Amino acid sequence: KEEEESKEEDICSQQNGTSKRKNYQRENKDGKKAGGGSRQRDKKAPTKDQKESENKEKKTSKNGKEGENKEGTDRKNSTSSDSSGEESLSEEELAMLMEQVEQKKKLISTMRNKPWRMVKKLSVLREAQAFVEKFEGALGKGKGKKLYAYKMMMAKKWVKFKRDFDNFKTQCIPWEMKIKEVESHFGSSVASYFIFLRWMYGVNLVLFSLIFGLVIIPEVLMGMPYGSMPRKTVPRAEQATAMDFSVLWDFEGYIKYSALFYGYYNNQRTIGWLKYRLPMAYFMVGISVFGYSLMVVIRSMARNANESTADGDDHNFIFSWKMFTSWDYLIGNPETADNKFASITTSFKESIVDEQESNKDENIHLRRFLRVLANLLIICCLCGSGYLIYFVVKRSQTFSKMQNVGWYERNEVEIVMSLLGMFCPPLFETIAALENYHPRIGLKWQLGRIFALFLGNLYTFLLALMDDVNEKLAEEDVVKNITHWTLLGHHNSSLRNGSAATPPPLDPADVPRGPCWETTVGIEFVRLTVSDILVTYITILVGDFIRACFVRFVNYCWCWDLEAGFPSYAEFDISGNVLGLVFNQGMIWMGSFYAPGLVGINVLRLLTSMYFQCWAVMSSNVPHARVFKASKSNNFYMGLLLLILFLSLLPVAYTIMSLPPSFDCGPFSGKKRMYEVIQETIELDFPLFVAKIFSYVANPGLIIPAILLMVLAIYYLNAVAEAYQRANTELKKKMQMQREEEKNKRNNKASTNPVLQDMEDLLTPSPKRETHPKQAEDKNMEPPGRTSPGGKQGKPAALDGSPRTGGRGAALSPPPPQRFVTQPPMLGVRAPYPGQLRPWRQPLGTVPGRGRGQPWY
Amino acid sequence: RLFYRYRDLAPQLVPLDYTHKPDVTLPYQLIGSMPELKDNPFRQRIAEVFSARGDGNMTLDDFLDMFSVLSEMAPRDLKAYYAFKIYDFNNDDYICKADLEKTVNKLTRNELTPEEVNLVCEKVIYEADADNDGKLSLEDFQHMIVRAPDFLSTFHIRI
């Protein structure tokens, strides 16, 4: 029996490997083969089993019972197998066997949750696995047996393969050690920023590979090379300065006419020998960038929402949670540990003070007034910054028309935006001091305001850009005419000069060029991103590193203690950094349609940012003084990301739908609207019926009902979700009530028992005392009733003893409502006026004698 | 990977070859000096809970056990079970007031006054004790800790 059992245990433990255990097993324990391994009837097992059976006995009864169950079935199993052999199992034994195998499998899958020792788990797992393997093959009957066994083996191999792959994937995750280092020094909240950064890097990498592989590479490899077409060449006028660094820095010159920007792409319908439809690909990739990002963000949000199940309604356990969950086990650094100790102490002290203190009576009106004032100030700031940006962008347009612009004028827009981003948040914080909120709420307000600031800036920027675009569109018409006439003129002149039928082609550099508004937009976004990157890096360098150097080295010869006092070391500003990252991503999303190379720039930025910020954090920041909860904020940042995604989708969608593309640059040139490329593809590339299907589907008569249906579905699902939520809260309340009831019951039980003993002692029949209880009856009925053994006697005891124990009866806590329900007859009878009952009772002769007795039930 | 960490603690004691299941235990001092555990005020209790003999000396299996429970992937109930055992200083399967006092003192490094400590412990018992016996049993503890939003993220060691 023991051996069978130990085999089963082996199986169970084997399948329960964490990745580390897998490595450990594979590397070291050659004897114990991992996975669907060999059936080992090693002789060492029995000795281990004995140890384990001892262990088992020490464990809780739950485990013991399970062991017993297993033993019982094992006994049966072993006898059956011994007697009949594998080939000829009878029907019922087969069924029993199957049941056992199921049981074992279940055990294997839940092994991870059992709080047993590792040694035990391993052996149990191995046993169960060997058992399953041995008998699973036997379950298939006759001919089918081999196939069944084969299937099982394949299934097991597949499971093993999946697990190996998972292990491999876990090992591939980059920067794990770096993040761990940061985590041990700074706690889990700072590390969550880096984990977010890493996740963004992954998303951007995917987007970049999409764009690079499907758009840039085909154009570069299979499209017309540089210099062959007007749109791909630097105009003659600019060629002199095209290679200058200052021009390149502004993304003009050669860079403007490269694959990084929209204007480079040719509008040829198919290119190369693959007949690759580039315009279509460009369009679809643009859309799928948004689609993929949306999917990834929502999936991440759903996963986060799943983990944080409890709503945190329970404010019941504040102290308990503080005690048991405040220590962050990830901390591995003495300085952080010191900080943590200090913050825990402070937090305990704060809660204690909260407990002891009564609510302050505050001046509500003053508070409200201050808050309104603060909000007004902040709205003024936001409007002011929006106007400033608009003004600056307008000015930059006039600058671009001028010659001889200095470096400052050229980059004015970006500088102003960065400065605003740097100085407004602290301003908001100081104004927010007026408001006097609880710190966590204050933080949320702060984040919201910074978000509004950045959003306002971005959209003002966009509006100004739109003005620019419209101007360019107007210009385009003019240029179109000029180009047309120039080409015509060139043809005529060439015809006149030579007699050749075909005119020599005009050098592409000489063709008058239309203003390519898409490329301009792309350039603006790229410039904005680059300046944002630079500003961030410089801020980190100056704000953190230089400051730390200053504080460290100048401290010796300074009047006051720099480290404790004013500049001191910087703390890592999590929220600021996360917001910066989120906004950067928003800009990338907006600009990637017009500048395919932008995502590549972002990937580089995230990569370098990871290393740079890790270094900066470790070298010049100090851990936070206050505790910051990392858990709930994750979904908050994802929510921000989602919002930004939508907001950045809007401008792009608007321009795609309503602005005509430039006539001489980009993959959609010559069309009236960009989305016409889809229609074109459907008409020309797909068989006829597809076009018909699409035309039916695109019919408004079909689309509007579909939209209505979706709206109704959303409404219905919302209602269902609300109903569940309500049921949830009801259940919680019920549990709460039950808990409190039990608490009260125990409390009462503890305190009524002595009272009851007294009442029992006073149990001498006396008619007089019977009358008294009429008043005290209702009160005293329940408590004695509860202690059921002396139920009937208890009541008269209460009745009799009530005058004496009236005081104590009053001291008894109010009885639970249930008891009233179970004693209706008594109530009904005793309700009437006390005086009346006496004459009614006397006729019942036996009663007075006994003095107790409740003849009327 | 974990095995190499274990071995690094005492290379001369731990053989590379585990096929013959040697019985090797590392003393508590070595375990307690690991960087992940060095600053943890509960490291002694952790080692005691996970060691087979209850004295802090751990075999490789105990070591594995410990980090497996403290890893990201361990289920909540399992962690709650082991957390209970860690905070139960006198090993009587109940967290009584003395255990709570020791916990608080370890957490705050004795910076709170005795009255404050007392108040905190009483509050905890009041909040979490459902069967009203003046101490926390496993069910009370589990019931309370399962609702805590950051239990999973704090009771976690990355290795």
Image (cartoon, grey):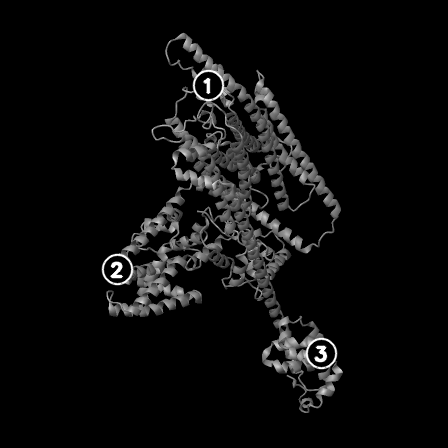
Q: Are marks 3 and 2 on the same chain?
A: yes
Seen from the viewer's position, the closer of residues A685 and A620 is: A685
Q: Which residue is mark 1?
A: A234
Left or right: A762 in relation to A580:
right
The N terminus of chain A: image quadrant: bottom left
Q: Which residue is mark 2?
A: A144
Query: Can the viewer see residue A240?
Result: no
Q: Residues within 10 Å of mark 1 (few under 14, many from 20)?
A: many
- Residue A653 % position (x, y): 52, 35
Q: Earlier in the sequence, mark 1 or mark 2?
A: 2
Under tag 1, what secondary structure?
loop
Tell me the chain of label 3. Answer: A
Q: Quadrant of residue A551?
A: top right
Q: Earlier in the sequence, mark 3 or mark 2?
A: 2
Seen from the viewer's position, the closer of residues A399 and A370 is: A399
- Residue B150 % position (x, y): 53, 51
Q: Are marks 1 and 2 on the same chain?
A: yes
Seen from the viewer's position, the closer of residues A461 and B126 is: A461
Tell me the chain of label 2. Answer: A
Q: Which residue is mark 3?
A: A831
Given the current orientation, which residue lies at the most extreme top position?
A497
- Residue A89 % position (x, y): 26, 67
Q: In the rendered structure, are the residues bearing label 3 and label 2 in contact, judged by CB atoms less than 8 Å apart? A: no
Seen from the viewer's position, the closer of residues A265 and A91 is: A265
Q: In the rendered structure, are the residues bearing label 1 and label 3 in contact, judged by CB atoms less than 8 Å apart? A: no
